[in-house]
């Protein structure tokens, strides 16, 4: 038997846990960052990524204003920092990144700064915004990839050295234990 009559606006919850990133924006002197669980690759060539941001977020303004953002991929040891930037708004706390215990560093190609503690940073120029509903998809073209050499492997990064995080209802998990199965892949 299957349960039905579920509030349709909770449908997205059946697609969790979700890979979670920190998106930084603004400038080194006026930075902002938020946690994002709704993100997706959109194209390999050109290299495009989509992040979904609700209009009420302060980042909605800072990304639009600066026309760029950085996708920072946190390791599992940064769950508290990720959670902090995911529940405090830069509108209320301009120093939220520092208060979260995170450090900023200059990006190579864009004004938005990178999060130093994240070993993977994808620098993006904002190329389009699509309204989807109560979120808007910010489409970024990746113009630079910075990866700490200690975690790099031939494909992208070594998952035994960097554990990406997944979030579901106030809890985080790591993906690593599921990635030890060898399957045919391209
Ligand atoms: C794990 C996690 C994932 C989140 N994912 C998103 C998301 O995909 N899109 C979004 O608009 N907000 C998301 N949020 C909420 C924002 O990160 C949160 O409201 C943040 O405080 C906004 O900061 P800002 O106002 O400084 O931009 C998420 C929060 C958490 C804790």
Image (spheres, rainbow, N blue to C red):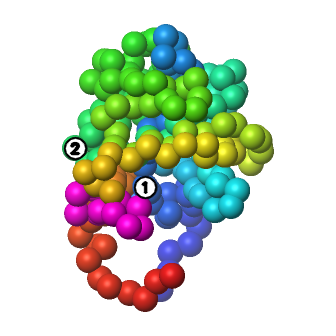
- The residue drawn where x is 44% and y is 57% is 18
Left-right relation of 50 to 176: right
- What numbered label is drawn on residue 19? 1
Q: Which residues are magenta?
A: 153-163
Residue 132: give its label: none
Q: Earlier in the sequence, mark 1 or mark 2?
A: 1
Q: Is residue 113 above or below residue 38?
A: above
> What type of secondary structure mainly makes up the magenta span?
loop
Is residue 157 found inside the magenta-colored segment of the image?
Answer: yes
Q: Position of residue 13 (x, y in %)?
A: 49, 57
Within 10 Å of the Cα at label 1, are there few (<14), some (14-19), or many (20+) other Cα atoms?
Answer: many
Report the residue marked by disc 2: 77
In this rendered view, identify the residue nearer to me: 1 or 122: 122
Q: How far apart in space, not on screen, are marks 1 and 2 (Cα)?
A: 15 Å
Label 1 element class: strand
Who is closer to the viewer here, 69 or 2? 69
In the image, is residue 112 above or below residue 149?
above
Identify the residue at horizontal 29%, vertical 63% (top origin): 159
Q: Quadrant of the rendered structure where residue 123 is?
A: top right
**CB of residue at label 1: within 8 Å of ligand 1?**
no
Residue at the far bottom in the pictured view: 184
On screen, residue 163 versus residue 147, left or right, reads left
Where is residue 169 shown, x and y percent of the image? 37, 49
**Rendered image quadrant of residue 52:** top right
Number of on-image labels? 2
Could you say whether the residue bearing mark 2 is in a helix, strand or loop? helix
Residue 50 in sight: no
Which residue does the image show at 32% across and 46% down from the upper left? 148
How far across and how far down the image is residue 2, in percent? Answer: 50, 81
Mark 2 Cα within 10 Å, few/some/many (few <14, many 20+)? some
Q: Is residue 26 above or below residue 15?
A: above
Q: Is residue 73 left or right of residue 123?
A: left
């Amino acid at each position: 038997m299957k349960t039905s009559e579920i509030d349709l606006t909770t449908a997205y919850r059946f697609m969790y846990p979700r890979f979670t990133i920190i998106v930084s924006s603004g400038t080194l002197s006026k930075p902002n960052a938020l946690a994002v669980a709704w993100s997706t690759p959109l194209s390999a060539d050109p290299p495009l990524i989509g992040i979904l941001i609700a209009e009420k977020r302060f980042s909605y303004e800072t990304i639009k204003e600066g026309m760029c953002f950085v996708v920072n991929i946190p390791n599992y040891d940064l769950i508290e920092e990720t959670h902090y930037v995911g529940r405090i708004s830069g509108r209320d706390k301009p120093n939220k990144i520092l208060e979260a215990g995170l450090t900023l560093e200059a990006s190579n190609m864009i004004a938005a700064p990178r999060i130093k503690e994240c070993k993977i940073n994808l620098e993006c120029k904002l190329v389009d915004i699509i309204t989807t509903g109560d979120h808007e998809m910010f489409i970024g073209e990746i113009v630079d990839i910075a990866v700490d050499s200690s975690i790099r492997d031939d494909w992208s990064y070594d998952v035994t050295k960097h554990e990406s995080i997944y979030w579901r209802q106030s809890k985080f998990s790591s993906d690593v234990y599921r990635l030890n199965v060898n399957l045919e892949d391209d």
